[in-house]
Amino acid sequence: MARPDRSDCVENGDGAGAYSEDGIPVVDFDVLVNGNSDQRLAAILHLGRACAEWGFFMVINHGVPESLQGATMDACRELFSLPTEEKSEYMEAGPMDPVRVGTGFNSAVDGAKYWRDYLKMFAHPEMHCPAKPAILREIATEYATRTRGLMLELTTAISESLGLDGSRIAEALNLDNCFQILVGNYYPPAGPDVGAIGMPTHSDHGLLTLLFQNGVNGLQVKHDSEWLLAKPIPGSFFVIVGDQLEIVSNGRYKAVLHHALVDGEQARMSFVSLIGPCLDAVVKPIPELARDAPQGAEFRGVRYRDYMEHQQSNKLKENAALDIVRVHRQILTREGSPNSSLINV
Ligand SMILES: O=C(O)CCC(=O)C(=O)O
Ligand SMILES: [Fe+2]
């Protein structure tokens, strides 16, 4: 298990939780699951604040072996180095195809070239994987199982942090049949192309995203209107609040905007494991949360499959997909929104 040195974290004086030296909240998963009731309560409050104020945190002592993280990254690197003809059958794939290999975000609609190669594999309810490299299936399956378990545990704690029963979000979104996708990102060195963007600003379409990288920084998150370079504690995961958590929490937790920069000299890699609701679940604010909010429900209901397809088929633009399902008077005047097929449930 990754056990970071405690000196990597700064303990807040009032015992309210730990932060990295850059001020990013750090959640100790071991305390969340195995702590006594006082420790758990403090960890849940810290987690809730991290989701509300940042939409982003690091998780330490998470139980996913560092060797498995390394093996996953290595298998992914092998895939990217295969000759194009070995990957070509996945390169024609569309956003809802279970295995996709490509360049940019969605090269068909990007209009701009981003410095990124990617591999996307649907991992749950069914594992899909390219045939080569042969080692990939076993490693990706193990990685998907371990990280799914971790994110489902985090979801229980997040549910409690909203004052709900631990199982409330899982029931509302049918997380027994949750959707999961694994994404490997490879960003070649940009050389003199200073300021090149690897992946444009966006929020993630799912519920929670877990991310780690190959030791080359580049992930930036927007916090208090500023872009902050996220520097990980060794062995930790970054956790990113996604659009579905913003919807289900009725906006109490925010889907954080983030993007990836490329390095001038070194290749950067990141590996993402994302869970979302069951693809057929209609996602809407939990009624108890909407009832207690001054303005009522902040979002309309939307089927996750439709939401994801829309977000993945269009140019990545901040959190434009979330704005379509947001109940805001001015949205009705925004070009294109009233007719969107997303506002249908
Ligand atoms: O490479 C990164 O750090 C960001 C990747 C990302 O945001 C994504 O795959 O959704
Ligand atoms: Fe992302």
Image (spheres, grey):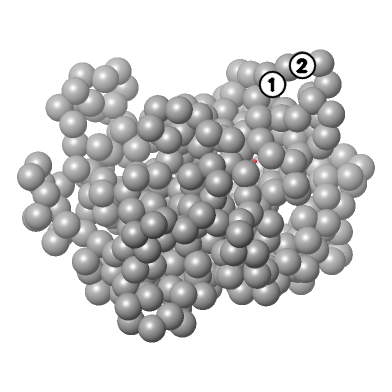
Mark 2 vs ligand 1: CB under 8 Å?
Answer: no
The label on residue 57 is none
Q: CA distance from mark 1 to mark 2?
A: 6 Å
User: Which picture quadrant has residue 218?
Assistant: top right
The label on residue 193 is 2
The label on residue 196 is 1
Q: Residues within 10 Å of mark 1 (few under 14, many from 20)?
A: some
Task: Look at label 2 and name its amino acid.
Answer: Asp
Is residue 119 in sight in this rendering? no
Which element type, helix, strand or loop, lies under badge 2?
A: loop
Mark 1 vs ligand 1: CB under 8 Å?
Answer: no
Which element type, helix, strand or loop, lies under badge 1?
A: loop
Q: Nearer the viewer, residue 38 or 96?
A: 38
Measured as percent of width and height from the top left, residue 194 is found at 73, 17
Q: Are marks 1 and 2 in contact (CB under 8 Å)?
A: yes
Is 6 located above or below residue 76 in the figure? below
Is residue 293 in sight in this rendering? yes
Task: Look at label 1 and name its amino acid.
Answer: Ala
Measured as percent of width and height from the top left, residue 230 is found at 58, 41
Is 76 located above or below residue 154 in the figure? above
Q: Residues within 10 Å of mark 2 (few under 14, many from 20)?
A: few
Is 210 located above or below residue 65 in the figure? above
Q: Nearer the viewer, residue 126 or 12?
A: 12
Q: Nearer the viewer, residue 95 or 154?
A: 154
